[in-house]
């Protein structure tokens, strides 16, 4: 009888550890996919040239177009709707929050040091660019892990 109870207990422990490992693996995949989406969104935003200023020989980003491109790429890469809520097939279950979206233009002196003390983030831009900080929560499968949330940061400069 003792061996039977011990066996059942060990099976429960083994399944719990297995569930923990699966949750950790899926969480890592989720954070990598979300980080790539943030990087792509920042890069897409940094490609939005202000054509009127370009005609005058000034390299600048269109703030409205950059914001639109960043949100559009986040929606496409993370499969989100217009209000940044996950669509069916998305690796997420909670709303994605854009914590910071900064468009740094020609009116700053370069190299420009972007600092965000709230998120303990700092980056250096050598020409006009975009900084994007997004908050993502991991939808746990088994509830073995404590809730996991990330503030993912990305930045990109104007490519010319």
Image (cartoon, rainbow, N blue to C red):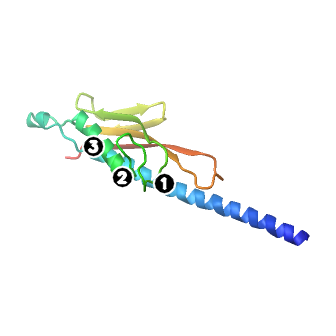
Residue 38 picture location, percent across and down: 38, 47
The residue shown at (24%, 34%) is 64
Whole-angstrom CA distance, mark 2 to mark 3, is 12 Å
The residue shown at (42%, 54%) is 88
**The quadrant where residue 111 appears:** top left
The residue shown at (38%, 51%) is 79
| Label 1 SS | helix
Residue 127 in view, yes or no: no
Q: Earlier in the sequence, mark 2 or mark 3?
A: 3
| Label 2 SS | helix
The residue shown at (63%, 47%) is 146
Residue 101 picture location, percent across and down: 35, 35
Toward the left, the furthest residue is 55
Of residue 143 and residue 48, the one placed in the foreground of this image is: 143
Query: Disc 2 designates what residue?
Result: 77
| Label 3 SS | helix
Residue 7 to residue 86: above or below: below
Query: Disc 3 designates what residue?
Result: 69
Of residue 89 and residue 147, the one placed in the foreground of this image is: 89
Toward the front, the furthest residue is 88
Residue 25 picture location, percent across and down: 56, 60
Label disc, if present, on residue 30 of the rendered structure? 1
Whole-angstrom CA distance, mark 1 to mark 3, is 22 Å
């Amino acid at each position: 009888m003792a061996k039977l109870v011990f066996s059942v207990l060990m099976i429960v422990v083994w399944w719990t550890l297995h569930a923990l490992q699966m949750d950790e693996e899926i969480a890592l995949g989720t954070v990598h996919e979300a980080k790539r989406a943030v990087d792509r969104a920042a890069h897409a935003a940094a490609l939005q040239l202000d054509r009127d200023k370009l005609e005058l020989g000034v390299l600048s980003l269109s703030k409205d177009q950059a914001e639109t491109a960043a949100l559009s790429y986040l929606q496409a890469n993370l499969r989100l709707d217009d209000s940044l809520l996950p669509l069916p097939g998305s690796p997420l279950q909670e709303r994605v929050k854009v914590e910071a979206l900064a468009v740094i233009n020609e009116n700053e002196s370069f190299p420009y040091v972007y600092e965000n003390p709230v998120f303990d983030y700092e980056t250096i831009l050598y020409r006009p660019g975009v900084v994007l900080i997004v908050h993502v929560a991991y939808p746990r499968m088994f509830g073995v892990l404590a809730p996991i949330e990330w503030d993912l940061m990305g930045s990109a400069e104007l490519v010319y």
